[in-house]
Amino acid sequence: LLIFLLDALKAYAMVALSAVYGCCAPESMLIYGVAGALLLGNAHSIFMGLRGGKGVATAVGIFSYYLPWQLMLGFMLCWLAVVKVTRRPFVASLTAITLLTIVYASVFYDHHAFFLASVCGWIGIRHFANLQEWYKLKTKAS
């Protein structure tokens, strides 16, 4: 939990700093580039032999910059509910991030929606192996 919070805070801080010190509006390509670099650095860390995390905490930090706190609270509640039902944190992460993106896109419908959808896609790609393994376990149990 501590690592998750630190990763999310780091991502939030970097995106916010790029907006402030980049002398640009939040919709700037600089901010999107910083967010993309954060996800890429999380997935392929030079400190871990070009291996890394799935990017969920980093995505939460990025999303926290763009989204109202009410949506982030909804994300956390959705995540907790899905974990309670499935007992699989990766399923909860994928579900919560997907729902968060859909809600944002349907409520605000602005240019950030495409960016947030691409972050959601990145998280999905990073979890593909987990999904395959889970599917194998489910079909084997049937």
Image (cartoon, rainbow, N blue to C red):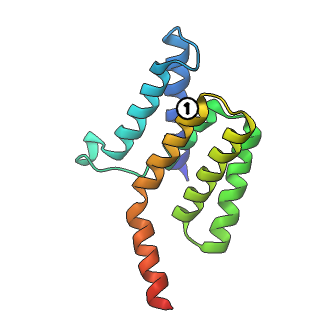
Which residue lies most toward the left here? 49
Relative to 9, does residue 111 appear above or below in the rendering? above
Residue sitting at x 49%, y 41%: 118
Q: In the image, residue 21 lies at what x, y percent?
A: 50, 11
Q: Nearer the viewer, residue 102 or 39?
A: 102
The crowding category of the residue bearing disc 1, from other C-alpha atoms within 10 Å (few below 14, some 14 to 19, many at least 20), is: many
Indicate the amino acid at tag 1.
Answer: Tyr
How many labels sit on residues?
1
Relative to 119, does residue 78 appear above or below in the rendering? below
The reply, left or right, for residue 139 in relation to residue 82 is: left
Q: Quadrant of residue 61?
A: top right
Q: In the image, residue 46 lies at what x, y percent?
A: 25, 40
Residue sitting at x 50%, y 34%: 11
Which residue in the structure is indicated by mark 1?
12
Q: In the image, residue 94 lies at what x, y percent?
A: 55, 57
Q: Quadrant of residue 66?
A: top right
Residue sitting at x 45%, y 68%: 131
Q: Nearer the viewer, residue 29 or 63?
A: 29
